[in-house]
Image (cartoon, rainbow, N blue to C red):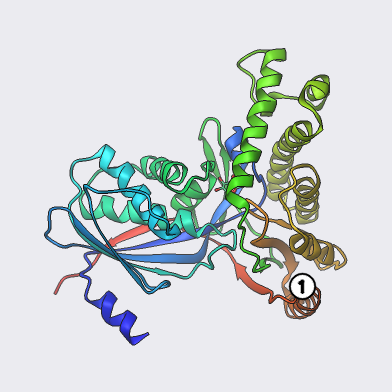
């Protein structure tokens, strides 16, 4: 610990960035299908401290979590075999294509977002770094440019063909609000979220989503195939969100069962997001919660991105009347469930579900309460 502190203290800092993880209330696997999502930034964040080091191109990035110092030159940016380094390199690769103003810098990263939990620590890191460098070198990039370049970094350097939701939520978050994002037009609305006396509780399976990247890209490819078949039938300019269940049925035979189920899930999920927003605006938390249970069923049975641990947690929640809704969150195959639970029940519930989970899977269950919070912020450090 002392060693870590000494290493990171040696790196000079001019800008401090706080970059949040995200939750997604509803609208899973819809972003890369041109659909709707309802995420929020959260109060779990990554802090990055960045400083110019007066060199032309030498960089040092220190991860406190991995106690790992990474040194590289700006004119030699190539993929590595280490996950977190690829997020850093991917962002730099994208930024270097957009500006000639980057110079050598030092950066210390300290994360308070549990890795692999589905709270998108990766988007927080990408966007935080891009935000910080933008501020440090006065690059003049807009928030949307930062969001898009961070997504592209993940596509090209990490290999996950992710949608725009995570990077968007991390950058654009607003205290006590969720955001309805139309992933086709990129229009969005802030919607106040007041669930009182209910709270958002995340239960972390501690199952790291190993398969997630290849399975994720497979799901995306399956939906694209389904859409191509639909477009053959109904015209080039339709998207999955324009497709009704009866249009889909007409293409069922050509698609085959798997692709049909994937598309069916996406169509139903888009409609659920819009119904959930209506419920939220009308303060109908019971209806909002029951839509979360429906989403989980769809993700588990039609989209097939759940796992036994996630299904177990959602089934357990369903038995408790103080939980109005629960579902897996994020890409799937592990990570967290999101639960809407009465504030008076949290202590008993977490104790019961923790015991049941641990005795079934011999694995620890972690839990966190969270709130919609503000997006990425960069502040120039005071010099004395
Ligand atoms: C991951 C991706 C997002 C989104 C979700 C599923 O978090 O990064 O773009 O597709 O999975 O909704």
User: In this figure, what is the number of numbered marks?
Assistant: 1
* Nearer the observer, 111 or 157: 157
Few, some or many residues within 10 Å of mark 1 (<14, 14–19, 20+): few
Residue, far right: 319
Would residue 180 appear left or right of 196 to someone viewing this image? left
Quadrant of the image for the C terminus?
A: bottom left
**Would you identify the image quadrant in which residue 7 lies?**
bottom left
Would residue 50 appear left or right of 185 to someone viewing this image? left
Quadrant of the image for the N terminus?
A: bottom left
**Would you identify the image quadrant in which residue 266 lies?**
top right
- In percent of width and height, residue 238 lies at 64, 20
Which residue is drawn at the image coordinates 21% and 47% (left, top)? 75
- In percent of width and height, residue 126 lies at 40, 53
- Vertical comparison of 6 with 139: above or below: below
Q: Secondary structure at mark 1?
A: helix
- In percent of width and height, residue 224 lies at 63, 29
Residue, far bottom: 2
- In percent of width and height, residue 81 lies at 42, 56
- Vertical comparison of 19 with 361: above or below: above
Which residue is drawn at the image coordinates 61% and 52% (left, top)? 212
Q: Does any portion of residue 239 appear in the rendered image?
A: yes
Which residue is drawn at the image coordinates 81% and 68% (left, top)? 322
**Would you identify the image quadrant in which residue 49 lies?**
bottom left
Residue, far front: 81
* Nearer the observer, 321 or 330: 330
* Nearer the observer, 131 or 280: 131
Q: Which residue is mark 1?
A: 361
Which residue is drawn at the image coordinates 74% and 41% (left, top)? 272
Q: Does any portion of residue 191 appear in the rendered image?
A: no
**Mark 1: C-beta under 8 Å from nearest atom of ligand 1:** no
């Amino acid at each position: 610990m002392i060693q870590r502190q000494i290493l990171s203290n040696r790196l000079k800092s001019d800008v401090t960035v706080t970059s949040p993880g995200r939750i997604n209330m509803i609208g899973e696997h819809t972003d890369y299908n041109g659909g709707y999502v309802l995420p929020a930034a959260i109060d779990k964040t990554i802090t990055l401290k960045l400083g110019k080091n007066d060199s032309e191109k030498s960089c040092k990035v220190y991860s406190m979590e991995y106690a790992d110092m990474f040194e590289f030159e700006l004119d030699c940016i190539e993929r590595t075999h280490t996950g977190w380094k690829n997020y850093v390199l991917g962002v730099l690769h994208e930024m270097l294509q957009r500006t000639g103003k980057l110079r050598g810098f030092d950066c210390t990263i300290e994360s308070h977002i549990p890795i692999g939990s589905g709270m998108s620590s990766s988007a927080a890191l990408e966007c935080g770094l891009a935000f910080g460098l933008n501020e440090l070198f006065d690059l003049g990039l807009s928030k949307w440019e930062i969001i898009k370049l961070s997504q592209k970094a993940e596509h090209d350097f990490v290999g996950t063909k992710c949608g725009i939701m995570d990077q968007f939520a991390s950058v654009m978050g607003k205290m006590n609000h969720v955001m309805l994002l139309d992933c086709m037009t990129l229009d969005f609305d802030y919607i106040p979220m007041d669930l009182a006396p209910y709270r958002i509780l995340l239960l972390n399976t501690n199952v790291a989503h190993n398969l997630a990247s290849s399975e994720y890209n497979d799901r995306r490819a399956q939906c694209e195939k389904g859409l191509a078949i639909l477009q053959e039938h109904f015209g080039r300019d339709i998207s999955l969100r324009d497709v009704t269940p009866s249009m889909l049925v007409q293409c069922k035979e050509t698609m085959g069962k798997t692709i049909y189920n994937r598309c069916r899930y996406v169509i139903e999920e888009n409609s659920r997001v819009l119904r959930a927003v209506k419920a939220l605006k009308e303060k109908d938390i019971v209806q909002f919660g029951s839509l979360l249970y429906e989403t989980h069923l769809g993700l588990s049975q039609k989209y097939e991105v759940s796992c036994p641990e996630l299904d177990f947690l959602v089934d357990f929640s369903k038995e408790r009347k103080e939980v109005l809704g629960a579902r897996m969150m994020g890409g799937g195959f592990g990570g967290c469930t999101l639960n809407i639970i009465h504030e008076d029940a949290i202590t008993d519930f977490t104790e019961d579900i923790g015991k049941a989970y641990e005795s079934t899977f011999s694995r620890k269950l972690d839990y966190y309460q969270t709130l919609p919070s503000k997006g990425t912020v960069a502040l120039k450090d005071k010099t004395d």
